[in-house]
Image (spheres, rainbow, N blue to C red):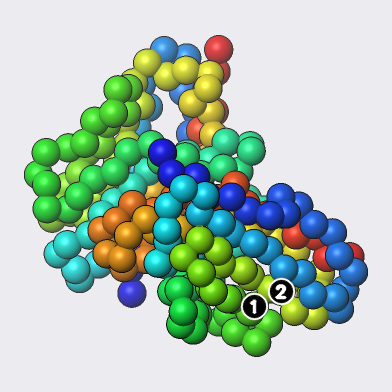
Amino acid sequence: GAVVSQHPSWVICKSGTSVKIECRSLDFQATTMFWYRQFPKQSLMLMATSNEGSKATYEQGVEKDKFLINHASLTLSTLTVTSAHPEDSSFYICSARIGPHSTDTQYFGPGTRLTVL
Amino acid sequence: AQTVTQSQPEMSVQEAETVTLSCTYDTSESDYYLFWYKQPPSRQMILVIRQEAYKQQNATENRFSVNFQKAAKSFSLKISDSQLGDAAMYFCAYRNNDMRFGAGTRLTVKP
């Protein structure tokens, strides 16, 4: 099947700094990518949907100025957590859709564990 | 808004036995997809099975099968001949434009 990678797999940063997480579709082009956040022992919560070349669409309650999403190419989307705080510590998972239609298959990355000290 | 409900936070099954995980959802759409994902301790999401809403026939993948009741908006997962490797978190998901997940069920398999 198609492969989605994330980098880094884990990161520790100091409060107030910014962290960038990369999501890549390795063997397919992804017009649309999704970013999820998963707190310990909880479900995946959709944060935003990004389409290549356009602004991301954020879910209600997600601060777009804090979680900057860039989808500059068909194989790369980045999530930047700006001025990170301990409450931003979580597991971030990206997902890439293999085609332009909502019926197309969606593949998940392995996730990035962010710890903010 | 679409919601997905998994009412069983934890389930346990004896190895080689059968277990059913429940899922209900709420939507006003007629065309959508439903999924069951497995998340082991590695946290990698693994697709177990998918069901297209327009198909009446229940999906089956080896030991995994679903009971899809569209009118009741129910989508349960049956795992037959449970194996130790089946132990994981299981998430039910609904997708129309984007994918929404239930709270998850932690499955324990006893040897």
Q: Which residue is identified by label 1?
A: A67
Q: Residue furthest bottom?
A: A65
Alpha-carbon neighbours of circle 1 within 10 Å: few (<14), some, or many (≥20)? many
**Rendered location of residue B46, percent (x, y):** 47, 40
Q: At x 63% / y 37%, what residue is drawn?
A: B41
Q: Quadrant of the N terminus of chain A?
A: top left
Q: At x 57% / y 36%, what residue is drawn?
A: B40
Disc 1 element: strand
Tell me whether circle 1 and circle 2 mark residues in contact (CB < 8 Å).
yes
Query: B70 or A30, which is in the foreground?
Result: A30
Query: A91 or A27, which is in the foreground?
Result: A27
Residue type at tag 2: Val
Chain under disc 2: A
Q: At x 27% / y 64%, what residue is drawn?
A: A101
Q: Which residue is identified by label 2?
A: A81
**Rendered location of residue A54, percent (x, y):** 46, 82
